[in-house]
């Protein structure tokens, strides 16, 4: 058409581009059980039409073939230009139910997507995970958020391998699917921390290290500890005015708010507790089951510590742990830390420094709890 100098109409160009993009996509398919039965019926009708020469059988045979072609075309159109954006949590607990949200976006301008099965496939360590959810209808240029409820079997790093979209629309004769790799996603996984068991904080064998008094952590705010006095500022609570100090400062009341003095309070004190995790030398005889129990004990102790009003800190291999979920999900005291686990640790503790806080030897406390 270019050689004749003719201009291709816009609707012809759109049809040609649509056909090219449609035939370039590779969406595998497989016949379902009804599909195989339908194929056998189609072959039988075709053989009967050839043997008898009956035009009605030829017509039915053509309708059967048309249904097969229509099933493949409509299922392909249903999966075409559908984007999936998974919304993963930062961390979850093993054994506790939680939700994973998948946002589906239909980028087609006029055609809806019908009866789509969304499958999120990944793994935790060596365990393969397949999570499925059905989306019945997705309008043209529309969005829908599906929720997958799941309970993680054990701790680790959940790595999403890919998202698979499949459909049996419209007749259920064949199933066609399309895979989306997680390299297109901003976040392809999350941490699964150990299962938390009910633990009594008073039963933990705490040891006092360093000074006679454990270290305290102070924060400004509503509390019962007086830190100091400062002049009245806009926004201060009038109930905190120190009337005696203000009277001593200003003998006569002159209505000047700047002359008033206000109490500056601290929140209630919080004691720090350091959890000392064992290294490879102390834990080389532990089995896989004992390591999982030790990780669950550490997570349960941290929760019990916070519920009692204390501030926990984890120290492992002379490192102070900064990102707690990553450490609890990947920690194995028998092996050297992995690169992902090292990123969760903060700066090293200087040699010879004594922690002015209560400490807990995790391995010894675990053995005491396990034996009891």
Image (cartoon, grey):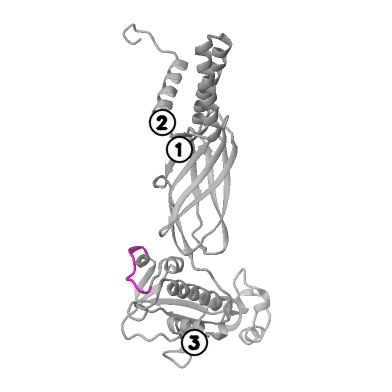
Relative vertical location of residue 200 with respect to residue 28 in this rendering, above or below: below
Query: Is residue 337 covered in magenta?
Result: yes
Q: Quadrant of residue 159?
A: bottom left
* Residue at position x 54%, y 74% in the image: 303
Element type where label 2 sits in the image = loop
In the displayed structure image, the side of residue 241 where residue 1 appears, left or right: left
* Residue at position x 36%, y 63% in the image: 340
Q: Residues within 10 Å of mark 2 (few under 14, many from 20)?
A: few
Q: Position of residue 108 (x, y in %)?
A: 51, 31
Which of the two residues, 250 or 279, is positioned nearer the viewer here?
Answer: 279
> Residue tagged by mark 2?
25
Q: Nearer the viewer, mark 3 or mark 2?
A: 2
Q: Quadrant of residue 254?
A: bottom right
Contact flag, marks 1 and 3 (Cβ < 8 Å): no
Query: Is residue 61 covered in magenta?
Result: no
* Residue at position x 57%, y 45% in the image: 145
Q: Position of residue 68 (x, y in %)?
A: 51, 24
Q: Which mark is residue 206?
A: 3
> Residue tagged by mark 1?
178
Q: Position of residue 30 (x, y in %)?
A: 47, 34
Furthest residue to the front? 51
In the displayed structure image, the side of residue 235 where residue 336 appears, left or right: left
Contact flag, marks 1 and 2 (Cβ < 8 Å): yes
Which of the two residues, 245 or 212, is positioned nearer the viewer here?
Answer: 212
Relative vertical location of residue 352 with respect to residue 297 in this rendering, above or below: below
What residue span does the magenta drawing correspond to? 333-340
Distance (Cα) linking label 1 and label 3: 55 Å
């Amino acid at each position: 058409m270019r050689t004749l100098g003719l201009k291709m109409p816009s609707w012809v160009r759109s049809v040609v581009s649509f056909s090219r993009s449609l035939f370039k996509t590779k969406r595998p398919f497989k016949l379902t059980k009804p599909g195989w039965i339908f194929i056998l019926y189609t072959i039988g009708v075709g053989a009967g039409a050839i043997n008898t020469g009956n035009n009605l059988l030829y017509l039915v045979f053509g309708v059967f073939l048309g249904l097969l072609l229509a099933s493949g075309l409509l299922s392909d159109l249903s999966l075409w230009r559908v984007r999936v954006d998974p919304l993963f949590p930062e961390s979850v607990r093993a054994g506790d139910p939680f939700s994973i949200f998948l946002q589906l976006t239909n980028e087609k301008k006029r055609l809806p997507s019908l009866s789509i099965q969304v499958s999120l496939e990944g793994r935790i360590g060596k365990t393969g995970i397949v999570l499925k959810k059905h989306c019945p209808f997705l309008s043209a240029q529309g969005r829908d958020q599906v929720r997958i409820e799941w309970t993680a079997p054990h701790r680790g790093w959940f790595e999403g391998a890919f998202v698979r979209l499949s459909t049996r629309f419209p007749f259920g004769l064949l199933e066609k699917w399309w895979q989306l790799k997680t390299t297109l996603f901003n976040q392809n996984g999350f941490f699964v921390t150990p299962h938390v068991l009910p633990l009594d904080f008073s039963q933990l064998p705490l040891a006092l290290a360093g000074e006679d008094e454990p270290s305290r952590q102070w924060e400004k705010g509503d509390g019962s500890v007086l830190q100091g006095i400062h002049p009245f500022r806009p926004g201060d609570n009038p109930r905190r005015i120190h009337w005696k100090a203000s009277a001593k400062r200003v003998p006569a009341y002159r209505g000047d708010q700047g002359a008033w003095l206000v109490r500056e309070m601290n929140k209630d004190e919080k004691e720090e507790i350091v959890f000392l995790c064992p290294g490879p030398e102390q834990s080389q005889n532990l089995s896989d089951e004992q390591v999982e129990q030790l990780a669950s004990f550490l997570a349960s102790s941290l929760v019990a510590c916070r519920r009692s009003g204390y501030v926990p800190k984890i120290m492992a291999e002379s490192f102070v742990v900064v990102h707690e979920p990553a450490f609890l999900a990947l920690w194995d005291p028998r092996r050297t830390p992995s690169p992902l686990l090292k990123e969760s640790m903060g700066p090293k503790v200087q040699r010879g420094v004594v922690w002015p806080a209560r400490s807990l030897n995790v391995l010894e406390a675990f053995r005491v709890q396990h034996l009891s």
